[in-house]
Amino acid sequence: MEQEIFRAGVRPGSPGTEDEVKMLLCYVLSNLEASMSFEQLYEALSEHGIINYFELIRALDRLVETGHLAAKEHSGAPARYAVTPLGVQAGKEFEKTLPFAAREKALAASRRLLERQRRLSEVRMEQTPCEGGFMLELAIPDEWGELLALRVFSPSREECELFKRRFLNAPLTVYKGVMALLTGNEQVLGEIFTREEPLF
C-alpha cells in the first residue's frame, strides 16, 4: 500500500526506485546549473508523470542529508535546492542508468519552467475591468523605464487571456511589429516573424 501511494501518478518508463529518483534530481540540477525550489521541481517533473509529490519530498530530504544537494533559503522565500560537487559527480556517474526518455523529458521540462518564469519577470501585464470589457496593459520594462507599453481593449476575459498568452510567447515579435509600423523600416518588417519558442 505504501509503495502504491508513493508511486501514484507516476507513468511507466519513469524512474522506478528511490535511488533512480535521487539520481534524476542530481542529473537535472547538474545540467541546469541553477537552483530550484520544491514547487518549481514539482511543477516541472510532475508534468509528464516523472515524479510524484511524495517521491520528490522524500528524495530531496535524503539528498540534503547525504550532502548531494544543499537547501538554501533567502529572506523568507521558499528554500531552493542546489547541487553540490558530490551531487554533480553522482549525476554524471549514474545518468546512463536512468531511462533515457524520462531523463530528457525531466531536463527539458525544468528548463522550460525556468524560461517561462524568466519571461514572466521580463514583462508586465495588467488587466482592468472597464465598460464593455477589459483594458489590458502590456509592457516590456527596461532599466530606463519601459521599452514598450501598449493598452488594448478586449471585450471578454477569454480574449484577454489570449492576448496575454500571445504576448508572453513573443514579446520581441510584438516589439518588432510596433517598431516596423512606426518607422516603416523594411529590414525590421522582414524580421518581425523571427520565431520565438512558445512557452505558454
Image (cartoon, rainbow, N blue to C red):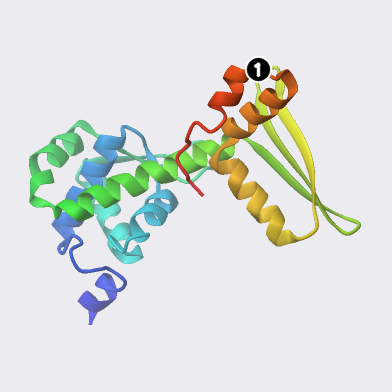
Q: Residue at x 40, y 51 (%)?
A: 38
Q: Residue at x 23, y 48 (%)?
A: 104
Left or right: residue 74 versus residue 130 is left
Indicate the quadrant containing the N terminus: top left, top right, bottom left or bottom right. bottom left
Residue at far right of view: 131
Q: Is residue 128 above or below residue 52?
A: above
Query: In which quarter of the view is residue 90 placed?
Result: top left
Query: In which quarter of the view is residue 5 placed?
Result: bottom left
Along the viewing direction, whichever of 40 and 151 lies nearer the viewer = 151
Residue at far front of view: 186
Q: Is residue 75 visible?
A: no
Label 1 amino acid? Asn
Q: Residue at x 63, y 35 (%)?
A: 123
Q: Is residue 66 above or below residue 133?
A: above
Task: Residue 11: give x, y in percent of width and height.
Answer: 25, 68
Q: Secondary structure at mark 1?
A: loop
Q: Is residue 62 above or below residue 142?
A: below
Q: Residue at x 49, y 43 (%)?
A: 116
Along the viewing direction, whichever of 32 and 181 lies nearer the viewer = 181
Task: Residue 185: give x, y in percent of width and height.
Answer: 65, 17
Task: Residue 76: give x, y in percent of width and height.
Answer: 54, 42
Along the viewing direction, whichever of 177 and 36 lies nearer the viewer = 177
Residue located beneath label 1 in the image: 185
Q: Is residue 20 visible?
A: yes
Left or right: residue 184 versus residue 188 is right
